[in-house]
Image: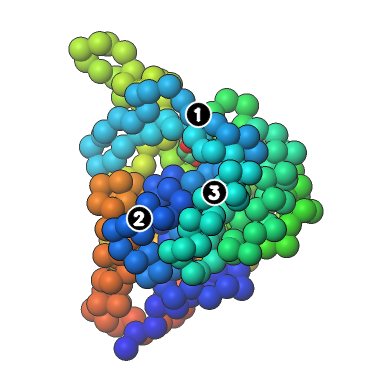
Amino acid sequence: MVNTKVMLCGIELDNPVIPASGTFGFGYEFAELYDINCLGTFSFKGTTKDPRFGNPTPRIAECESGMINSVGLQNPGVEAVIAEELPKLKKCFSKPVMANVSGFSVEDYAYTCEKLDGQEQIGWLEVNVSCPNVHGGGMSFGTSPEAAAQVTKAVKAVTKKPVIIKLSPNVTDIVSIAKACEDSGADGISLINTLLGMRIDLKTRKPVVANKMGGFSGAAIKPVALRMVYQVSEAVRIPVVGMGGVSNAEDVIEMIMAGATAVEVGAANLVDPFACRDIVENLPKVMEKYGINNLNEIKGCAHNG
Ligand code: SIN
């Protein structure tokens, strides 16, 4: 019997499979389809200080081997997440959940993280400095080492739970940003968020997405994600959560071989709501096929030699 357990920032996961923020709601929506306790954990919808309606529609564009989204951090705001979403989740999920947080100022991030840090259901805070769909926030904090460090320090000053900083691939030097977060006290790094992209409708001669551009995700971005997970895990000592184009158990193993401790699954949940359940079920079989008894024995093995 193979061992799928991994340790993420001091908390043991039954397996490394984590539905990514924005593709799994607040979990209870998927609990109507299957028992979500089979997951390692999941990262809930990006939460901000105030409620947000999100960007104008259309917000989604299909692409070859992927999709573009420009949701714009639609969410009910941190007070409603605590008062309404977390109690609903508690009825169907007994494991620690990952809280995903976005902001428009350093103070916003600190405020929302401090509130969520007080919730016993929450295991980790995933701080998103990489949303490409909003102005004056999100990705603007994740494209410079200084700004990412500022957010990390402010959040760490008001929280006790592990803080994982979610990075953007839309940068020239991902390693310097990851290292700035680590040096500022981050407990982990997750990457990659979406790649800024666009599509144009030949009939209307206009961008498909109302916001013109959006975040590209899906199978097509996996090689970029793997490369960045490899580079960052080589440079930092804190755990790395890999994501980007993961859609099956083989992809999970590939991410771990690149250096990831755990793996998030995003767009695949929107193609097939059972994707993560199936990955969890298939992971032991794929491990057996490749002679892997324990995921820790292959973590970062692609760096050897
Ligand atoms: C969104 O809500 O726009 C997506 C979140 C993200 O890409 O970080």
Specify the amino acid type for callout 1: Phe
CA distance separating discs 2 and 1: 22 Å
Quarter of the image with the N terminus in it = bottom left
The earlier-in-sequence mark between 2 and 3 is: 2
Specify the amino acid type for callout 2: Phe
Q: Callout 3: few (<14), some (14-19), or many (20+) C-alpha neighbours within 10 Å?
A: few
Residue corresponding to mark 3: 84
Specify the amino acid type for callout 3: Glu
**Residue shown at the point (46%, 63%) measured from the top left:** 91
Q: Position of residue 152 (x, y in %)?
A: 70, 49
Tag 3 secondary structure: helix
Q: Is mark 1 within 8 Å of ligand 1?
A: no
Q: Is residue 183 left or right of residue 34?
A: right
**Residue shown at the point (50%, 62%) measured from the top left:** 90
Residue corresponding to mark 1: 53
Residue corresponding to mark 2: 30
In this view, the residue in front, 124 or 199, is: 124
3 vs 1, front mark: 3
Q: Position of residue 178 (x, y in %)?
A: 61, 51
Q: Is residue 83 left or right of residue 299?
A: right
Residue at the limit of the structure toward the right, as seen here: 157
Quarter of the image with the C terminus in it = bottom left
Q: Callout 2: few (<14), some (14-19), or many (20+) C-alpha neighbours within 10 Å?
A: some
- Figure check: 221 above or below 43: above
The earlier-in-sequence mark between 2 and 1 is: 2
**Residue shown at the point (57%, 25%) measured from the top left:** 135
